[in-house]
Amino acid sequence: MFKKVLPLSTILFLRFLGLFLVLPVLSVYALDLEGATPFLVGIVVGGYALTQAVFQIPFGSMSDKIGRKPTILLGLLIFLVGSLVAAYSTDIYTLMIGRFLQGAGAIGSVVTAMIADLVEEKTRGHAMAIMGGFIAMSFAVAMALGPVIASHYGISTIFIITAILAFVAIIVLFTKVPTPPKIKHIYHNKTKTSDILKDPNLLSMIIINAMQKGLMTAAFVIIPVFLTQPEYGFNWAKSDLWMVYAPAMVAGLVAMGPAAVFGEKRNIPKQIFMLSIVLFTASFLMMGLTHSSALFVTAVIFFFVAFNMMEPLVQSMISKFAKVHQKGAALGIANSAAYFFTFIGGTFAGLYLDISSRETLGLTIGGISLLWLVWTALKMKNPLRYSHLVIPEDEVDMEKLKALESEHIAEWFINETEKVVVIKYATEKLEEDALKAQILK
């Protein structure tokens, strides 16, 4: 399993490393560009997310039709071009265009869907945890290196590094990534992408994913500005920002593993999500109200712990609830909503910095997080436990299989590469032997 996940996780690591390297410093450096205002800087920080939101669904659906690898290649090429445009920008508007282009290479849902293609569902939680771990490592490396590189070589150098990382990711794609198995689906009724939004479990995860990413961008707008701008009371040097990000990311990495394991094995993702939301709420309230550097650093640690506890479980739950032939589309919709909220989070934080105080911003985001906590407590349910029955194709009566109907069968499909039939069913409701008896020759 690890060999299948490692190359794709490496691609995400390289891509997110490029994006994250600029996050801890972009808001304060962009303020020095021609035409910059806090509001426009907020758009620049979250701008890539707007185009991610627009293109996640087309990229996800495209990958379901033409294949994962060609779609990932296209996304990486667009991302590379956007990085170069941002690198050579001299005003806030050109930088904004570069960020929009970076986001247009929307491959996140495609890579996640490809991991889901390659890995059995019973080990998919671990696979998503590995992927999340690589993303978290890209955070950690970026938080430590971004401020140092920017202070010594400038923000344009970071964008050039980002373009190089995208090129390396393309090499990994065609030299290390295995080809997913060919899957055949036979259904009595045609399914539509809109059906994804009608599934209450998927809708719950889409909202959770969106809120998590929106708060992330808001945090990356306000943390460096609060710490470095004298009017907010801390007056740190830009080159010292790594001192808050590095310990926060270490804490996040430590928390992520147990959260993923307990959430999957004990089937308690709802409880993990609620704990994370409590930490999000405390984090923003502390960042808005404290005048102590130590408490501010603690608040940032709370934020990264909350984010990393959620990350692997969110992707795993979405891929678990989605039907096999709609994983790309489902992850596309989820990530589209997430990136739209990422853009809103950055823009909202930038606008608030223009018109309000640090205290009001912290209280406002903290209040929104409390509402999110209440909604999750009332609406979200832990998933049912499913198993997969795998039978050689030549042992199955295809006419009986086509007629197979049960509310306790989530889906079935044929893996033509491995020549097996796979049936996903609720273990508490159906016996394996009884299920076999219905479809065997």
Image: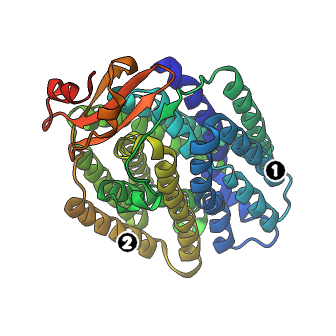
Q: Find residue 157 and report its horizontal and vertical position in percent.
A: 79, 43
Q: Position of residue 184 (x, y in %)?
A: 48, 34
Q: Describe residue 140's horizontal placement relative to residue 314 as left or right.
A: right
Q: Is residue 245 visible?
A: yes
> Residue placed at 70% from the left, 73% from the top?
37
- Would you say residue 235 is visible in this rendering? no
Label 1: element kind: helix
To which residue does mark 1 refer? 87
**Mark 2 → mark 1, Cα distance in angstroms:** 36 Å
- The residue under the point 58% across, 54% down is 56
Q: Quadrant of residue 70?
A: top right
Which residue is located at x 82 percent, y 63 percent? 94
Within-10-Å neighbours for mark 2: few <14, some 14–19, many 20+: some
On the rendered structure, is 81 left or right of 395?
right
Label 2 sits on a secondary structure element that is: helix
- Amino acid, disc 2: Leu
Residue 142 image offset from top left, x and y in percent? 61, 39
- The relative height of residue 377 versus residue 105 in the rendered view (above or below) is below
Q: Are marks 2 and 1 in contact (CB under 8 Å)?
A: no
Residue 19 lies, with reference to residue 258, above or below; the image says below
Q: Nearer the viewer, residue 170 or 388?
A: 388
Coordinates of residue 149 in the picture (x, y in percent): 72, 40
Which one is closest to the eye, mark 2 or mark 1? 1
- Given residues 166 and 218, the one toward you in this image is 166
Q: Which residue is mark 2?
A: 363
